[in-house]
Image (cartoon, rainbow, N blue to C red):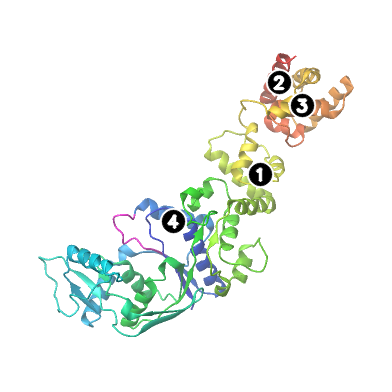
Amino acid sequence: MIKTRFAPSPTGVLHVGGARTALFCWLFSKKMGGKFVLRIEDTDLERSTPESVQAILDGMAWLGLDPDEGPYYQTKRFERYREVIEQLLEQGHAYYCQCSKQRLEELRESQMAAKQKPRYDGCCRDLGLKPDAGKPMVVRFRNPGEGIVSFDDHVKGEISVSNAELDDLIIERSDGSPTYNLSVVVDDMDMGITHVLRGDDHVNNTPRQINILRALGAPVPEYAHVPMILGDDGKRLSKRHGAVGVMEYFDAGYLPQAMLNYLVRLGWSYGDQEIFTRQEMTDYFSLDALNKSPSSFNSEKLNWINQQYLMSLPLDEIVTLVMQRLDRLEIDYDRSIDLAPIVDLYRQRVVTINELVDSIDYCFRDFESYDEKAAARALKLPALEPLQRAQVLFTELESWDAVSIHAVIQQITKELDVGMGKVGQPLRVAVTGGSFSPPIDQTLELLGRQRSIARVARAIDYVTTIK
């Protein structure tokens, strides 16, 4: 069975690059009818935090990348790692090393001065040292001294490294904790991982991990090392390019469907198609179609994709997201009111849920000022009489609903012998602060009688002051 894994270190949030890797792993496992494993590599005890673990889980849940297995935590597997280290020691594939930090630093400096590649010189390799409670010792993997490590990477092609270039890496620190290259190998072996998809910053680790797997007699997975994501300026994606944590995009009002759609196109393509359903991503995805060169993160493209989803997703889904956003902002509103018409109108004109909520904010809270251009066009002296008449008739209106409000507006146009625009547009600017809204009768119904009349009165005062 095909089995992939996403194995983040909980030293921060779930970044865009990590989310893309998780998506590729998830898609490949689903495409092949396999399983997707989530593994939290939290052996860095100083930097790993529960908050970071939760941030990763939240990001995965928001994107809908649910694992078939896990999450597994490496900190709960220390006994297993120690068992494997003992096995390697007994079989002669590992040894204890007592070299001090000072000696290693001096060795490194001398090698660099001689323009040599810094590497451990095997000082303790054949000393047959045993654990000494009075002296800090590490355990090193005895890397083969001859031969070549080769693997066929699904993205980069065949990669070959001479064992002579690889030194004896540390697999257990002096405090007894396992290192990354040991724990990841044991996990991949125990969990039956068949395909490792990860960032190409791990390419140099792969030959080392293959040698450890072979020493353990374990199958070697297939590898696909995906190029990094760059910012618009060609440099590695970072905070200076904007939000890089996945949940920052949730906070900013982006849709998970759009985020997934954008991420899948960062390093993978299927012809010229830009918009994909989740099922299409799964059906079309293949490792052979992964790009060999880095991808550039383009916020404008993400915005365009998010807008497409805002316009095409079922209206009730968007309304639910709007209501959730209103709740997070602690905006009080009448839940019996049908928000669908106003949400449907505004979602054609905005990029994110947050922008949509900002656009309809006037429905729930008073605005500080009018849009200058809208006020200059609509709140002029000719608007005074229609507004004053509306104030009176709205106050007298028995039933506050769109039909009754529409009848009042029609009555005013007849009484003053003016077109609908001469009444409706001043009312629109008066109650919304701008020149765009759903039909004015629906807008007024949504606002409610008290708030509508108060805003009409405010507009009357405004027009009076500019007479």
Amino acid type shown at disc 1: Val
Instruction: Give the total number of marks visible in the rendering.
Output: 4
Q: Which residue is mark 2?
A: 459
Q: Nearer the viewer, residue 223 or 293?
A: 293
Label 3 residue SS = helix
**Earlier residue among tags 3 and 1:** 1
Tell me the magenta residue range. Answer: 39-48
Residue 358, x across and y down, in percent? 61, 37
Q: Position of residue 442 (x, y in %)?
A: 74, 34
> Which of marks 3 and 4 precedes in the sequence?
4
Which is closer to the viewer, label 3 or label 1? 3
Rendering coords of residue 17 (x, y %): 48, 59
Disc 3 residue type (three-letter): Arg
Q: Is residue 281 above or below residue 448?
A: below
Magenta segment main secondary structure:
loop
What amino acid type is highlighted by mark number 2? Ala
Residue picked out by circle 1: 350
**Residue type at numbered disc 4:** Ile
- Going from N to C along the chain, the mark reached first, 2 or 3, is 3
Confirm or deny contact between disc 4 and disc 1 (CB under 8 A). Answer: no
Label 2 to label 4, Cα distance in Å? 49 Å
Q: Give the Cα distance between marks 3 and 1.
A: 23 Å
Whether the residues at callouts 3 and 1 have beta carbons within 8 Å, the answer is no
Q: Earlier in the sequence, mark 2 or mark 4?
A: 4
Marks 2 and 3 sit apart, C-alpha to C-alpha, by 13 Å
Q: Residue at label 3?
A: 377
